[in-house]
Image (cartoon, rainbow, N blue to C red):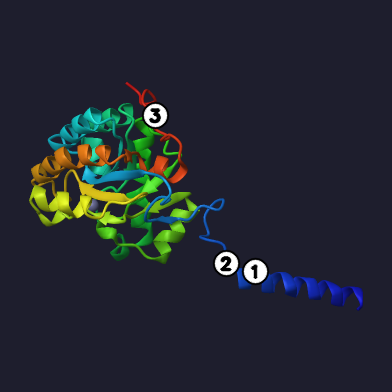
Amino acid sequence: MPRSNRLHFWVILTLLGFFLAGAPPGPAWGAEPVTVWSGAPDQKAVALTFDDGPSPVYTPQIMALFKLYQAHGTFFVMGHRVEQYPGLVQGLIKAGHEVGNHSFSHPRLTKIAQLSRERELERTAVDLDLLGCPQSERLFRPPYSAYDDRLKAYLAHTHRRLVLWSIDSGDWQGLAAPAIIKNVLSRVRNGAIIIFHDNNEDAQADRHPTVEALRTILPALKAAGYRMVTVSELLHRHGSPCQPGEGKD
Ligand SMILES: [Zn+2]
């Protein structure tokens, strides 16, 4: 076989092997997927996540419960509330919780222009950086879970993860605490990412049922042997990038 034909042969064979094996997961940096629904099923750990905060009423109550049960959570905050309540965000970081980006003003990102999307993400990211969370593991949760391929491409390009969930507590529907408890405890499994809300988009929601439900959920998960960790720890099995003491005073 002539040399050039041999080369073509090996190129074609390599490409064929690539397509038979399937494309590698995700276009992201390294081998990490952009979109995340849960952690590995072989670890007895779950990540409790909270959207739409921080809230001066509910976030401190949730933090107190987490401290009681040696748990850590991930809080997907809105940028305009970060600017309103920077002390709450610093408190979360200092207590070892993780803080993720939930846009600046909670728009449906699929309905706005790309430049507006980028402003929503980047202004919030700058606010979080300034508060002492380096955002080395940059987590984003889209408002209304609305995303498209263009948003995913932007997140991949900016080395962010799109963090969704495997268990919906249903607290956003205005459920009472027993229904929230049932939604979580009847579905919990290894590696679950569970979504709660410590506020809502217009700060009008009553989140007492969420706090009340956590008074049962946290001890129940602990008694069942689950570690309650941040999303980053769930994904990487090591500590959150925002460890206690890293936040600025
Ligand atoms: Zn939200």
Residue 104 appears in view: yes
What residue is shown with label 1?
18
Specify the label residue 243 is tagged with: 3
| Percent x, y of residue 213 | 14, 44
What residue lies at 10% left-to-right and 47% top-to-bottom?
177
Q: Quadrant of residue 132?
A: top left
Q: CA distance from mark 1 to mark 3?
A: 40 Å
Labels 2 and 1 touching (C-beta < 8 A): yes
Total of numbered circles in the picture? 3
Side of 212 where 88 appears, left or right: right
Q: CA distance from mark 2 to mark 1?
A: 7 Å
At mark 1, the secondary structure is: helix
- 215 to 176, vertically: above or below: above
What residue lies at 29% left-to-right and 34% top-to-bottom?
71
Looking at this view, name the residue that lies furthest to the top.
249
Could you say which is closer to the camera, residue 85 or residue 247? 247
* Label 3 CA crowd tier, 10 Å (few <14, some 14–19, many 20+): some
Q: CA distance from mark 2 to mark 3?
A: 35 Å
Specify the label residue 156 is tagged with: none
At mark 2, the secondary structure is: loop
